[in-house]
Amino acid sequence: MTPNRAAIADLFPSKLPDGCVFRPGLLDLSCQKALLAAVREVETTAPTARVLTKTGGYTSAAITNCGQAGWWSDAKGYRYETMNPLTHQPWPALPDVFRKAVADAVRGTPWSGFTPDACLINFYEPGAKMGLHQDKDERDFSQPIVTVCLGDDAEFMIGGLKRNEKTDVIIVRSGDVLIMGGQSRLRFHGVRKIYPGTGSLPLVIGRYGLTFRKAL
């Protein structure tokens, strides 16, 4: 079982860093189901896969993409590709329901005009995780990263601008949104743990993280 938010106050920072906006429960169950259906549609033409990292291992989470470009990793390094390297076809277009969820997420924030051109979809099976990293393969760091959570609860780490700086942890649940922009745009972050069977979407065993970016 995942710990209750009220019972793990020690895990939560008293205040998130400037530029981090956490919007728990923003997307209701109906929206979550629509987002999941759109993810499944993307996966029909661009299946998720664990990809090779430049250090020689494979990602713990499986990935796919949609939009004008997709984030990719292999022996050549980290980059965006306009064609899916596995299928040699363009990535699926961003579904309308994705665009609406992002518009709802950024409303009232300093990035209310944010329009993504790419969505990296990470799927974490039980036991999968993602180490601390920066999102720095995009061209314009004035644009935020918007992450939508679907499925099981997870421990999300938010670090500093250097890998060895203090890390805070928050519990993210299905329907939550986390935005990292401004002074927090290049903070290290990652996913430490998944809590299987805790999500509000019974068809998901694990967690999807939909990470919206302005890549090009």
Image (spheres, rainbow, N blue to C red):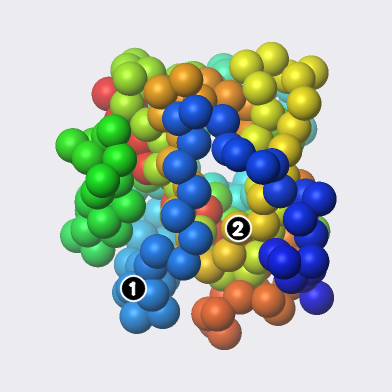
Q: Residues within 10 Å of mark 1 (few under 14, many from 20)?
A: some
Residue 91 visible within the image: no
Q: Is residue 89 left or right of residue 179?
A: left
Above/below status of 210 relative to 27: above
Residue annotated with mark 1: 31
For disc 2, the marked residue is 172
Q: To which quarter of the image does residue 161 belong? A: top right
Q: Give the secondary structure at mark 2.
A: strand
| Tag 1 and tag 2, C-beta contact below 8 Å | no
Q: Which is more N-terminal, label 2 or label 1?
A: 1
Residue visible at 71% across and 53% down in the picture: 155
User: Which quadrant is home to the C terminus?
Assistant: top left
Residue at coordinates 58% horizontally, 65% vertically from top-left? 173
* Mark 2 nearby-residue class (10 Å; few <14, some 14–19, many ≥20): many
Q: Which mark is residue 138?
A: none
The x, y position of residue 97, in whole percent, is: 24, 63
